[in-house]
Every structure is written in structure tokens, then in C-alpha cells.
Image: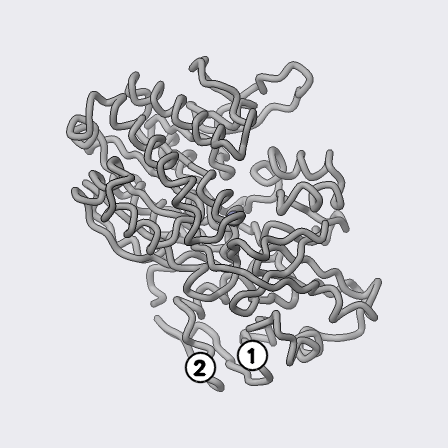
């Protein structure tokens, strides 16, 4: 039997922050793991926003298959906004009760694509036991009743399922997750549950998601996050090592993949993407959050995505727009365009090649545009800029992410005791399946042909 596998996802940790952490002396658990593993950078998906990224990590699919397009999007069939938590004000603007239902339940039960297979579904169908702690993409086969008596809706997760104290498959005695977010109570909850799970060796595969680093990085910027959040991240990882009886004992029992879902870059300025389309009220819906935006054409709008793109020429907050034109995709930047489409085992391109400077840009852009829930025009923000959310909130003066740019899109990727290439965050799920000898879903095999 292969070793059991622990997947650690540290939200929003940049490669630079990871490298500083393992070279310094403030993160001994991370440093221990780094000393025993192989390390490289890997690329995220577009938009590089957490619900999109975590869905990609857990399903091994891009947004074309898993269908989660962003933190905020327009639901064409239900003709309403879906908001997964850009900010409290954005949740309120989209309707608090609906947004909470979308974030906790509908994202997994209704929005996640039916063709997408989660790592928990695949492994548990093969007879293994999967565990998930706090990760927002959790869809599994097992019905779980919430812990709060006034919440009656059940959720379907893996056998061992822990979600911010709201779902707990087992009584672990962990403190409430949400009692003090700013002080790190969410990761403290994860650590308590993780300690319980490792102590009992209660899984074959564990997805262990730590969200506090991103939270701090938004407030303080990617350089300042470590001062507050690094020790907390390390303590949450150390809790797993200690529960196994020590670091060496931990690695005797478990293979490890540790990475982040996206990067972060410093933002100083903020724009409202809606302003460029203010005269099109009733013909388009504009959604934006962090460093990515979308424009949806409503039925009978009487204009096309190319016209939407040209409106953003000269807009300082916008770096690149993406759209489909027939069989091709078009990336536009400052009036210059690059056309591209998959051809054979690579890509056919024509036009402005300078648009190719973002990591893995063709594959990421194509997948984002092929998502049936995506807008007709996708927007990637310029360096230093953020796009205000539905509630007008932003992180100017701190950090953000979501764009095609390398700073938002390249993540640290560490692996120990598992053979895999892991060049992209979508490689993690197929690597986990291969580790246990489980066949990948068809979309993973189809994608492997395209460079
Ligand atoms: Zn974030």
C-alpha cells in the first residue's frame, strides 16, 4: 500500500513568502517539510481567485469543466448575482441569505459542474477514506447534518468532513472556527481538527486548508503577511507533525503535497469596472472582485463582446480583456490583440505576442472563457490596481489577486513522497489519484495531450 496522503493548501502564500519562510527560523515545520521534499513554482488558474482555484485543485479541472467562474458572477438561468464572499458589504449587496446559501451549499451542490469529479468522490468510490478540513470545494457522497439546530439543510461531503464548525463528521472538541477571524481562529480550528485526525490516523487522504494567511495578506500586503500569519500557518502544520509523534514519524506515515491556491500582489489603486458600462444599464451585467472582472451580455443587448472590449481601451485599471470570437479566443491589451485556439497538441496564435508573457496564459484564458457561467468579456486588472466589489470594497494599500499576471498566478508547490510533475494546481488531483492507483477522470486524460 502507498503511504497515506496529506494535501496542505495555504491560501495566498506567494513563492517568495514560502522561500523566505523555509530559509528563516520562524517556520520550523515548513522548513522541515521543505528540507525533505522537492520544490518548484506552479501556475494557478484564471481568475486566480480562491473559489475558482480550490475547485481546480480538488477536481483537477479548469473552470471550463468545474464551472465556478469567479468570486462573483451572474447566474443566467436564475437571472441573479452569485457572490461567494468578496466582502461583507458585497454579501449584503447580493442578498445575505442567498449569498450564504450560495457559499455554503450551492457552490458544491448546484454550481460545481456535473462532469467534474472531486478527489473525495474518486478516492472514496475506490474504497479509500477521504477527509476535508475547511476547504470550500468539498463535494462528496456522504450526507452530513449541520451542527447548528437552526440550520436544517444537509451537505454532501467526504466521510470525514469539517467545515468551519458548521459541519463536523466527528466530535473533535475543536474550538469554534469563527470566534475571532483576525486573531487566527479559523486556522486554529483547522489545527485542532487536523491533530484529532492524525492522532487517529483517520483517513487515507486529507485536504487541509489554511485560509488565514490570505486574510492577513489582503490587509497588510504580500510582504507584510508573514509578520502576523507565518507563525500561525506553521503552528497549524506543526500540529499535524506532533500528532504523528514527531516530524520523522509524520513522514513515515504520510506523503505530502503543500502549495497555495494563488499568489498576491500589492495594490494601491481602485476602480469601478461598472463605470465604463454605465450607459448600458439593462443590457449588460458587470461583476468584479479583487483583480478580475466579467461583463455579461443580457439577451437582446444588441452589442458584442468586441465592442465591450474596445470600451476598456485606455482604462488604466484594465490590463487585458479576453473574449471568444467563433472558434477563436481574443486577448486584447491597449488596442493590440492576440488570437488563439487549440491546435493539435499545442496552440495556434496570431497577433500581438507580447500578450503571451503571463504564465500558462493560453490554457488558463481558454479554460476560463469555455466556462458556461463566465461572462462574454473577462477582465484582468493592471499591476497595482484592484476592481471594487459589489459593496464598493477593495484592498487598496494591502494585497490582492485574481489577474493573469505572474504575481497573482504563480504558487509555491512542494511534494514529499509522491511522484508527480505538479506544474499546475490542476495537476494535484490527478497526482493524488495516481498515488493510490485510481484512474483519473476523462477530462484529465484529454487535457494531457495539450501542452
Ligand atoms: Zn484572497
**Dot 2 corresponds to which residue?**
354
Q: Measured along the vertical axis of the image, is residue 87 above or below residue 399?
A: above
Task: Specify the label residue 190 is tagged with.
Answer: none
**The C terminus - image quarter:** bottom left
Q: Is residue 436 visible?
A: no
The residue tagged with tag 1: helix, strand or loop? Answer: strand
Identify which residue is drawn at 43% across, 76% down: 356
Q: Measured along the vertical axis of the image, is residue 218 above or below residue 167?
A: below
Identify which residue is drawn at 25% across, 46% down: 24
Residue 367: image x %, image y %? Answer: 50, 62
Q: In the visual, does 221 lie left or right of 410?
A: right
Residue 316: image x %, image y %? Answer: 62, 74
**Dot 1 corresponds to which residue?**
333
Identify which residue is drawn at 50% across, 31% down: 183
Q: Which quadrant of the structure image shows residue 160?
A: top left
The residue tagged with tag 2: helix, strand or loop? Answer: helix
Residue 372: image x %, image y %? Answer: 61, 57
Q: Measured along the vertical axis of the image, is residue 170 above or below residue 423?
A: above
Amino acid at each position: 500500500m502507498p503511504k497515506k496522503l496529506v494535501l496542505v493548501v495555504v491560501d495566498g502564500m506567494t513563492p517568495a513568502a514560502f522561500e523566505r519562510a523555509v530559509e528563516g527560523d520562524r517556520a520550523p515545520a515548513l522548513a522541515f517539510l521543505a528540507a525533505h521534499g522537492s520544490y518548484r513554482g506552479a501556475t494557478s488558474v484564471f481568475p486566480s481567485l480562491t473559489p475558482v482555484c480550490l475547485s481546480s485543485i480538488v477536481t483537477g479541472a479548469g473552470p471550463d469543466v468545474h464551472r465556478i467562474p469567479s468570486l462573483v458572477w451572474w447566474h443566467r438561468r436564475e437571472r441573479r448575482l452569485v457572490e461567494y464572499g468578496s466582502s461583507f458589504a458585497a454579501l449584503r449587496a447580493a442578498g445575505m441569505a442567498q449569498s450564504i446559501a450560495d457559499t455554503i451549499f450551492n457552490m458544491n451542490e448546484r454550481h460545481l459542474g456535473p462532469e467534474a469529479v472531486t478527489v473525495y468522490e474518486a478516492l472514496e468510490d475506490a474504497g479509500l477514506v477521504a477527509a476535508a478540513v475547511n476547504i470550500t470545494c468539498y463535494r462528496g457522497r456522504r450526507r452530513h447534518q449541520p451542527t447548528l439546530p437552526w440550520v436544517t439543510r444537509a451537505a454532501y461531503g467526504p466521510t470525514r468532513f469539517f467545515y468551519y464548525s458548521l459541519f463536523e463528521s466527528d466530535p473533535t472538541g475543536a474550538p469554534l472556527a469563527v470566534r475571532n477571524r483576525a486573531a487566527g481562529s479559523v486556522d486554529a480550528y483547522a489545527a485542532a481538527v487536523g491533530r484529532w485526525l492524525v492522532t487517529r490516523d483517520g483517513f487515507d487522504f486529507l485536504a487541509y486548508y489554511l485560509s488565514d494567511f490570505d486574510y492577513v495578506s489582503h490587509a497588510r500586503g504580500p510582504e507584510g503577511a508573514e509578520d502576523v500569519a507565518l507563525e500561525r500557518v506553521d503552528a497549524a502544520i506543526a500540529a499535524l507533525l506532533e500528532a504523528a509523534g514527531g516530524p520523522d514519524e509524520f513522514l513515515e506515515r504520510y506523503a505530502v503535497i503543500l502549495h497555495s491556491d494563488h499568489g498576491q500582489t500589492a495594490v494601491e489603486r481602485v476602480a469601478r469596472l461598472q463605470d465604463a458600462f454605465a450607459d448600458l444599464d439593462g443590457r449588460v451585467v458587470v461583476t468584479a472582485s479583487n483583480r478580475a472582472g466579467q461583463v455579461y451580455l443580457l439577451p437582446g443587448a444588441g452589442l458584442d463582446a468586441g465592442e465591450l472590449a474596445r470600451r476598456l481601451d485606455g482604462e488604466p485599471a484594465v490590463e487585458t480583456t479576453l473574449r471568444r470570437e467563433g472558434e477563436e479566443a481574443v486577448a486584447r491589451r491597449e488596442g493590440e490583440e492576440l488570437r488563439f485556439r487549440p491546435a493539435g497538441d499545442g496552440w495556434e496564435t496570431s497577433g500581438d505576442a507580447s500578450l503571451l508573457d503571463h504564465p500558462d496564459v493560453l490554457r488558463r484564458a481558454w479554460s476560463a472563457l469555455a466556462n458556461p457561467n463566465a461572462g462574454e468579456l473577462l477582465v484582468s486588472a493592471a499591476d497595482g490596481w484592484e476592481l471594487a466589489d459589489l459593496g464598493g470594497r477593495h484592498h487598496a494599500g494591502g494585497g490582492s489577486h485574481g489577474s493573469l499576471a505572474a504575481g497573482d498566478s504563480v504558487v509555491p508547490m512542494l511534494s514529499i513522497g509522491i511522484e508527480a510533475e505538479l506544474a499546475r494546481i490542476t495537476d494535484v488531483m490527478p497526482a493524488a489519484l495516481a498515488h493510490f492507483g485510481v484512474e483519473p477522470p476523462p477530462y484529465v486524460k484529454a487535457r494531457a495531450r495539450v501542452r
